[in-house]
Amino acid sequence: MITNEIRFDCQQCGDSGPLVVVPHIDGTPLTELIDSYEIAARMQPAGDAYGGLIPEFFRFGPMQDHFLGLSTGAMGPKTPVLGCECGEWGCWPLMARITATGALVTWDAFEQPHRRTRDYAAFGPFQFDRRPYDDALYALSAVIGSAAGGTGA
């Protein structure tokens, strides 16, 4: 079975803004992957609609839990993997079902909850080997933890 590679890019928004988390799948930002998909499918609006998640702004819980699909209690059965380009995840989120087993983590059943008629059946699924996925989550948590410690948050 061929699996995808993931890393979580964590960049500061502006000079002293909050950290923004964007998943990269096989080296490409998820924001670019979904933009290309929506544009090719002639969805409107499409292109530059999504941005990363800003953990500081929302109570996702630990990012390790969030990206394992464990922080979805208040959000329904799916997990926001991207937010709106404005920084508000609830404004224009990309949601996915995240299923974790001992060997794999799968992202599938993508949806844009504000446009329920959109068909994302051909987007994904993305499957990740569990150990490298956990390593990517650990690296993300280290960055978020060091940033929070450095800002006094």
Image (cartoon, grey):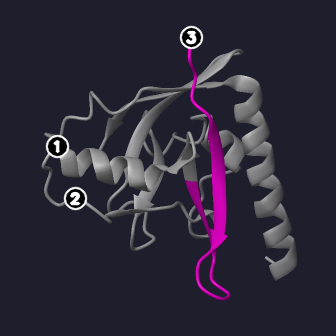
Magenta span of residues: 1-22
Residue 46 disc label: 2
- Which one is in front, 44 or 67? 44
Q: Secondary structure at mark 1?
A: loop
**Residue 152 visible within the image:** no
- Alpha carbon distance from label 2 to label 1: 9 Å
For marks 3 and 1, the one nearer the N-term is: 3
Q: Secondary structure at mark 2?
A: loop
Q: Position of residue 25 (x, y in %)?
A: 54, 41
Specify the quadrant of the image occupied by residue 130.
top right
- Which one is in front, 78 or 140? 140
- Alpha carbon distance from label 3 to label 1: 27 Å
Toward the bottom, the furthest residue is 15
- Which one is in front, 47 or 18? 47
All told, the count of numbered labels is 3
Q: Quadrant of the C terminus?
A: bottom right
Toward the top, the furthest residue is 1
Q: Which residue is mark 1?
A: 41
Q: Which residue is mark 3?
A: 1
